[in-house]
Image (tube, coloured by chain):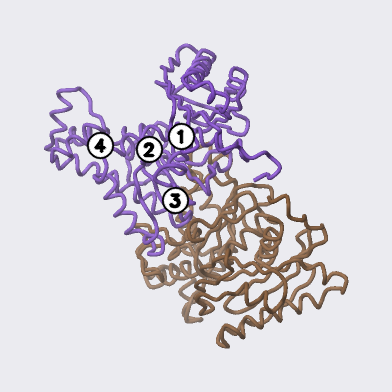
Chain colours: A brown, B purple
């Protein structure tokens, strides 16, 4: 840490913003990690880059306006989480497929509108950063986090700092290829882990089970709804459907196998599982943990913790705010 | 970096020491990374911990004594590389099977004898650190290095700093399990990568090929010598033996498969391959690289470099000296 920079007062407030393809969510985060003011709006990607950036700025101003006047001047920085490839040093959203953005100098454009320092980060890094600082990873130095959502991605937080890797490209755990996964991934490769371990992957396995004529209530759900989701698989599992249980089991085992290749090389203290599909809970986490532990040397199996995220949808907002705080203090 | 500490003068010299089960090798390293004085002796593990530590100290003093008097006072620190588990913060060799050491407070015992600051590190971390600072990784920020020797281990250097992970246990890439590897590892697990990707593993595959009745000159070598080494497989390959070539090919492919699980998560700039078995050269590196690239997303395949170590057996000495330098300056 640069000792010549002024240390922040304990009263500084930081703002975290999560920008997704559907919504922009914003929160003012107090030094204790609590969100003390919130705002949100629809992203409306189709309006174009500048309209979305205007809306991000408006949403931030709204969260600030909701604070008592005395606290407004305590705002010391903004962190914004963006899907896809990000250059956090130069504040550029390099490629956000959900937003249709390429090479958008988001930090500069927001700083211009807000006159507050702005940092940007990949949204999975932000989520795991929030969990690492104030959530399930708060007492650990080496935090590997995963989000099992539409896709599967990872982030690694080392001693309170996001690990970016070369080109800030680290975290693509979803694209580890497996020879025994037959599915073609959106990325063009065959066998990517996320074709099974994701909400999409769980739904795909469910559709496959039905089309293979398996005896499962998922067949009835598909007939009623016309399509199946990961949530349907969780519901069927809770209702005692053995095929649904087997799908979650296989999903957990595949993730356990992938993590068994990463843990000996990285030695994380804790693995945090988050994202929508993680709501399947123990039906997914138990086989994951059991498969992973069975494949690890005892020195790793004994000390490694596997936990689900604690902060839910607040993790991104808190993580983005804490990334802005880290940047202000370093 | 702590700005309040005094910066070193450009003339400071650091000593690197590699302690193996057979030899102790020592070198004084100049600020340009060159070794300007060397000494070595046999380890003679059977004499016990204190006798070996005395010999390490004597070897260091010998290298210092060989310097011109004016340079002796420029020695600013010693770095010692030790096999096995190391606690670098407290300077303790936790478990070095080759040396028969457990919980040896090596740094304190050497400082007591030498009156010079001593840092210790795992020898694979030191080797890769040397390559990262002055060898094949010198222009990169994220350096993943492997040593293919008796076993297989890895080290990761991030922005000029050894990445230790939880419990300083990172780097056990050799113990990633594969379902299609049938061999039982020294660690007790079945299917560990190092049962194939190591000098021992290459020799084991050669012995298997002979006992399976394959048509190979390795059969004649085995008959003549009574046993086979990885070096025999390289020699047979160079003589055009197709079975030997297939063994090196399979070894490279297995390592490529393991690295394909690690690269997307870590995004190293470069992978450096070192250790004795790496002397098989292109016969091993070419299939490794080709298998790895075929399994990576284009964003990783395009930017990742795979290189062999450049410093040979000097990498450990240089790395240990540079770890002592890093410690003196941070």
Cβ atoms at labels 3 and 1 below 8 Å apart: no
Checking the image for residue B318, the label placed there is 1
Task: From this view, report whether residue A113 is shown above or below residue B107.
Answer: below
| Mark 4 crowd level (few <14, some 14–19, many ≥20, 10 Å Cα) | many
Q: Earlier in the sequence, mark 3 or mark 4?
A: 3
Residues at discs 4 and 2 in contact (Cβ within 8 Å)? no
Badge 3 crowding class, 10 Å Cα cut-off, few under 14, some 14 to 19, many 20 or more, is few
Counting labels gives 4
Residue at left 56%, top 47%? A268
Q: CA distance from mark 1 to mark 2?
A: 9 Å
In the image, residue A282 lies at what x, y percent?
A: 58, 56
Same subunit, labels 4 and 1: the answer reads yes
What chain is tagged by disc 4?
B
Q: Is residue B283 left or right of residue A66?
A: left
Q: CA distance from mark 3 to mark 4?
A: 36 Å
Q: Secondary structure at mark 3?
A: loop
Which residue position is annotated with label 4?
Answer: B205
- Name which of mark 1 and mark 2 comes first in the sequence: 2
The quarter of the picture where the C terminus of chain A appears is bottom right
């Amino acid at each position: 840490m640069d000792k010549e920079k002024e240390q922040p007062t304990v009263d500084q407030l930081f703002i975290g913003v999560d920008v997704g393809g559907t919504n922009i969510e914003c929160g003012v985060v107090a030094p204790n990690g609590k969100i003390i003011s919130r705002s949100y709006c629809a992203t409306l990607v189709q309006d174009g880059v500048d309209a979305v950036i205007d809306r991000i700025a408006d949403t931030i101003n709204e969260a600030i306006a909701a604070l008592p006047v005395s606290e407004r001047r305590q705002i010391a920085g903004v962190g914004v989480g963006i899907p896809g490839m990000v250059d956090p040093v130069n504040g550029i959203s390099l490629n956000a497929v959900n937003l249709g953005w390429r090479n958008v100098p988001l930090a500069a454009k927001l700083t211009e509108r807000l006159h507050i320092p702005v940092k940007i980060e990949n949204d999975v890094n932000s989520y795991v950063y929030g969990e690492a600082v104030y959530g399930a990873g708060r007492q650990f130095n080496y935090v590997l986090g995963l989000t099992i959502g539409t896709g599967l991605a990872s982030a690694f937080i080392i001693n309170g700092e996001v690990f970016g890797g070369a080109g800030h490209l680290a975290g693509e755990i979803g694209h580890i290829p497996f020879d025994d996964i037959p599915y073609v991934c959106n990325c063009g490769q065959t066998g990517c882990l996320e074709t099974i371990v994701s909400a999409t992957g769980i739904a795909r396995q469910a559709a496959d089970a039905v089309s293979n004529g398996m005896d499962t209530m998922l067949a009835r759900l598909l007939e009623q709804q016309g399509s199946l989701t990961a949530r349907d698989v969780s519901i069927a599992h809770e209702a005692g459907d053995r095929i649904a249980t087997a799908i979650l089991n296989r999903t957990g085992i595949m993730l356990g196998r992938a993590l068994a290749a990463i843990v000996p090389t990285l030695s994380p203290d804790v693995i945090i599982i988050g994202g929508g599909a993680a709501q399947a809970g123990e039906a997914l986490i138990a086989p994951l943990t059991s498969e992973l532990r069975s494949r690890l040397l005892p020195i790793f199996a004994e000390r490694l913790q596997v936990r689900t995220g604690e902060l839910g949808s607040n993790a991104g907002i808190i993580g983005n705010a804490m990334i802005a705080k880290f940047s202000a203090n370093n």
